[in-house]
Amino acid sequence: RLVSSLFASRASLLKRKAKLNLIGEALNDSNSELLIKLLSDFDFEDEDLNSDEFGQLAPEIDGQNGLSKVLENVKQAIILENSYIEELLRILDEVGENIESHDPKFSIAMKSLEKFLSEGPVLVFSRYTDTLDGFLNLFRNSHLLNQVPGFALYTGGRAWIQTSMGVVPATKSDVTDALNSGVISLVFCSDAASEGLNLQTAKTLINLDVPWNPARLEQ
């Protein structure tokens, strides 16, 4: 996620920092119920360690003293990681406002989008919704906005269609029908669009994140 785009990097770091701060507060307040909930919801999707390897890193807890030591180590780890996150955020903030407009990947993708929109409907795909949001911001602030009759977003969790009449909530079939009828000529979509959504009317697919897995790419 961090390497998907500059916009996604910043968003991911901010989310991580907020989650770490909540865990730190739960530790300081000895709020075990909240701590368990936060840790159970923690996103280890992009971690290199599998669950067995991760478990082997945990020290044996010997009574209350052992637990206190582990919790103190966690607090120190949170402080250390937050310092790294703040430094990375500082570097990203130096890029300037509207960070998506400074992303080389987005710049190239916008050139491709301009070219292929003239040839027919286009799908813009990313595995990460933060990257889609950043590219969507860039598109909305570009001259290309006036070159499409309408466009849509479909991520599973969010789905809408925007035309000159405004933005309206949409379903899978709404997005498909709008694309087939020419009401829209551009769809921003995530992994959710790879299943149960027929978008074959589109002439071009622009992958902002090309999957390493050939099967996922084919899908």
Image (cartoon, grey):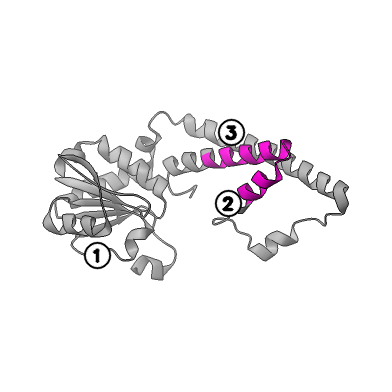
Q: Measuring from the top left, give residue 43's x and y in whole percent.
A: 56, 52
Instruction: Name the quadrant of the C terminus.
Output: bottom left
Q: Quadrant of residue 69?
A: top right
Residue in view at x 58 percent, y 33 percent: 86
How many other residues sit within 10 Å of disc 2, few (<14), some (14-19) or many (≥20)? few
Residue at (17, 58) in percent of width and height: 177
**Residue with the most extreme bottom position:** 215
Real-space CA distance between mark 2 and mark 3, rounded to the nearest whole angstrom: 23 Å
Q: Position of residue 131 (x, y in %)?
A: 39, 46
Q: Nearer the viewer, residue 188 or 212?
A: 188
Numbered range of the magenta stretch: 15-39
| Residue at which label 1 appears | 198
Nearer the camera: disc 3 or disc 1: 1
Q: Which mark is residue 86?
A: 3
Kind of residue at badge 2: Asp
Mark 1 or 2 closer to N-term?
Answer: 2
Label 1: few (<14), some (14–19) or many (≥20) C-alpha neighbours in 10 Å: some
The answer to whether residue 205 is magenta is: no
Please tell me which residue is depicted at 44% across the width and 41% down the height of the picture.
6
Element assignment for label 2: loop
Question: Label 1 vs label 2: CA separation?
Answer: 32 Å
**Going 38% across and 59% down the picture, which residue do you hit?**
191
Q: Is residue 152 left or right of residue 1?
A: left
Q: Earlier in the sequence, mark 3 or mark 1?
A: 3
- Front: mark 1 or 2: 2
